[in-house]
Image: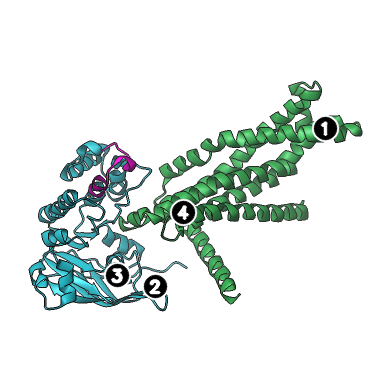
Amino acid sequence: MVIYLKNIFTDAGNVTRFTARFFKEIIRPPFEIKEFIRQCYTIGYKSLPLVGITGFIMGLVMTIQTRPTLAQFGAESWLPGMVALSLIREITPVITALICAGKIASGIGAELGSMKVTEQIDAMEVSAINPYKYLVVTRILATTLMVPLLVIFADGIGILGGYIGINIHSDVNLYRYFSQVLASLAFLDIVPPTIKTFFFGFFIGLIGCYKGFNAANGTESVGKAANSAVVAASLAIFIIDMLAVQITDLFF
Amino acid sequence: MIQEEPNIQIPNNTENSVPDITIKGLYKSFGENNPILQGVNLTVKKGENLVILGKSGSGKSITIKCLVRLVEADKGEIFVFDTDINTLGNSQLNAIRARIGFLFQNSALYDSMTVRENLSFPLKRHSKQLTTDEVDAAITEVLESVGLADAIDKMPSELSGGMRKRIGLARTLILKPEIMLYDEPTTGLDTITSREISELILAIQKKNKTTSIIITHDMACAKLTGDRIVILKDGVIDAEGTYEELEKSSDEWVRSFFI
């Protein structure tokens, strides 16, 4: 039990130091702009199909599942607004972040873990290149920026999925559907959920990098790094979501 | 907390008499009951090729990793170019590291980059004023020196073990290091390729007048490349001499390396 607690505190200390180093390195030149753009492409652009398909299915399924209940109360006209609100405020940010945790955090964990095991990170260090700046800072920045953009993209596709879902049983034109969607949305429905996605992105990158960068020697540790990155990032997403909802509720 | 770096002048060694590397009382352990180095003392003169022999796990790789502070020593002084590297801040340490080449056991080529990118990556960061043509010329020159000019656009996964070693060597040579550290350069290679790599190490030393430490289990490599050989045992230097001297040692354990 004592050893278990000691390990928890040691881990917490190491994560804090790792995070503090990120904020220290981010303001110090040189800036790895090219690598950052490359990571944005890999993390953002290459995740578009997966996030798009998931967003579309979320919107479609939610509409189909909700319609019968609303129909019982004769409130089918609320469907576009309700679907948009649910997607934008909660479902899309969390589901998209979870998908990113699975795809991106595990990818970063495995990539950096394998670089560590094959001494590529050491090779950078002995060539007087700062591996933390090149590998970690660029990836965390890219996830922090790309995850919110992916969520916004998934929101759009999800709302479009909702439109198709409604038109399976009724006939609503696109202009009217989007008018109802936009009429139901207020500032507070969009800004707080978008802010929390930056935190989702930051922690997905941070956890993936931390697990990969601190992988032990041996190929087994690469798998462990990828796996534990997904688990920890997913847990972090739920905790951040809970805190974000509480804070939003408290202030707005 | 950001530590202030001490103002230390890093000298340029030009005289042969000044040792490039001096290690005094180096200790390193992993955990309380796992001491690896227990007071290693070592001097390598400028232009010398020193071979370190020892059983697996005797601390050979740890010793050279301590030299570039990839591994932090528990105790002891390490002077590289007459500068105690344990007292240096990051930027000063990097200035020293830029003058040292390190060939890793598995070459440590960057998987996601082509051979060209592997070579240009450190060069562009250390010589920002170089034009693209100058970088290309430097890459071509160094690849020709290791006999792999035609591999320039290949990915590391397309290279054989021997080719990877050569590219790894080219990547370190492109920065024109004054000290070369080789961590088992011929491990996993066939006899012919091992000999080619050993001859390449020797050719590099003659051409660039580098100071080298070569860790190996390959006695043919040790014989060909080593001006002097030291043997690590129980975390200390147990024997020292030329290949011929150690081959005839009265210590049976030392002789067992040469059978």
Q: CA distance from mark 4 to mark 1?
A: 46 Å
Q: B70 or B248: nearer the eye?
A: B248
Q: Which residue is mark 3?
A: B59
Q: Secondary structure at mark 3?
A: loop
Q: Is residue B156 magenta?
A: yes
Q: Is residue A145 left or right of residue A59?
A: left
Please provide percent x and percent y for residue B211: 16, 62
Q: Is residue A49 left or right of residue B185?
A: right
Chain painted in green in the figure: A
Which is closer to the viewer, label 4 or label 1? 4
Quadrant containing the C terminus of chain B is bottom left
Give yes or no for contact between labels 1 and 3 (Cβ–Cβ under 8 Å).
no
The circle drawn on residue B30 is 2
Q: On the same chain: label 2 and label 3?
A: yes
User: Which chain can be seen in cyan?
Assistant: B
User: Where residue B180 sits in the image (x, y, percent)?
Assistant: 21, 59
Q: Nearer the viewer, residue A184 or B232?
A: B232
Magenta range is B152-166
Q: Is residue A122 visible?
A: yes
Q: Which numbered dot is residue A67?
A: 1
Mark 4 or 1, nearer chain start: 1
Question: What label sits on residue A222 in the rendered view?
Answer: 4
Q: Looking at the magenta stretch, what is its main secondary structure?
A: helix
* For marks 2 and 3 on the same chain, the one whose residue lies earlier in the sequence: 2
Q: Residue B179: image x %, image y %?
A: 20, 60
Label 2 chain ID: B
Do the dots labelled 1 and 3 sit on one chain?
Answer: no
Task: Classify A128 as above or below A66.
Answer: below
Mark whose residue sits in front, 2 or 1? 2
Which subunit holds the residue at mark 1?
A
